[in-house]
Amino acid sequence: MRVLITRHAKKRLLDLRQDRITARDIVNAACSIPGRIPAATRFRGFAARSGRTFDLVAKDIPTGRLVITVIGK
């Protein structure tokens, strides 16, 4: 599955709250969500390799899965 990360989500990775969450962590989390996501939906409880937990908001579009934002815990 193709995962697209918005500019907004990439920018948020630079914030302190999302420290130690990588783009690879986001791709792995987005790929682990089963089924189809027709509307933007928040998914909770993913863990980065560093141990940091995070949520993400994603939606399926014709070209793949779009990750709209990342929320670090």
Image (cartoon, rainbow, N blue to C red):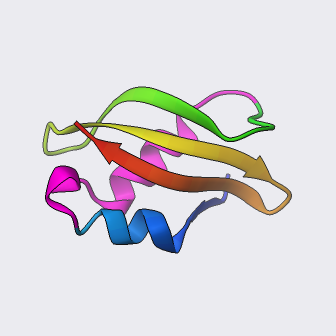
42 left or right, relative to 60:
left
Q: Is residue 43 above or below residue 14?
A: above
Residue 21, how many percent across, how many down?
A: 24, 53
- Relative height, residue 26 to residue 56 (above, below): below
60 versus 22 height, above or below: above
Total residue callouts: 0
- Identify the residue at horizontal 58%, vertical 31% (top origin): 33
In the image, taking residue 39 as reference, residue 68 lies left or right, namely left
Which quadrant is home to the C terminus?
top left
Q: Residue 32 colored magenta?
A: yes
Position of residue 11 in the picture relative to residue 21 (left or right): right
Which residue is rendered at x = 64% and y = 56% of the image? 66
Using the rendered view, name the quadrant where residue 68 is placed: bottom right
Q: From the viewer's side, name the closer residue of 72 and 51.
A: 72
What's drawn in magenta, residue-wise?
Answer: 15-35
Q: Position of residue 69 (x, y in %)?
A: 47, 53
* Residue 63 to residue 60: above or below: below
Residue 20 in view of the camera: no
x then y, percent, for residue 5: 53, 64
* Residue at 25% from the left image edge and 42% from the top image edge: 48
| Residue 56 on the magenta segment | no
The image position of residue 4, as x and y in percent, is 60, 64
Nearest to the observer: residue 28 or residue 39: 39
Left or right: residue 63 versus residue 29 is: right
- Rendering quarter of residue 58: top right
| Residue at the spot 17% in from the left edge and 39% down from the top edge | 52
Viewer-proximal residue among 12 and 62: 12
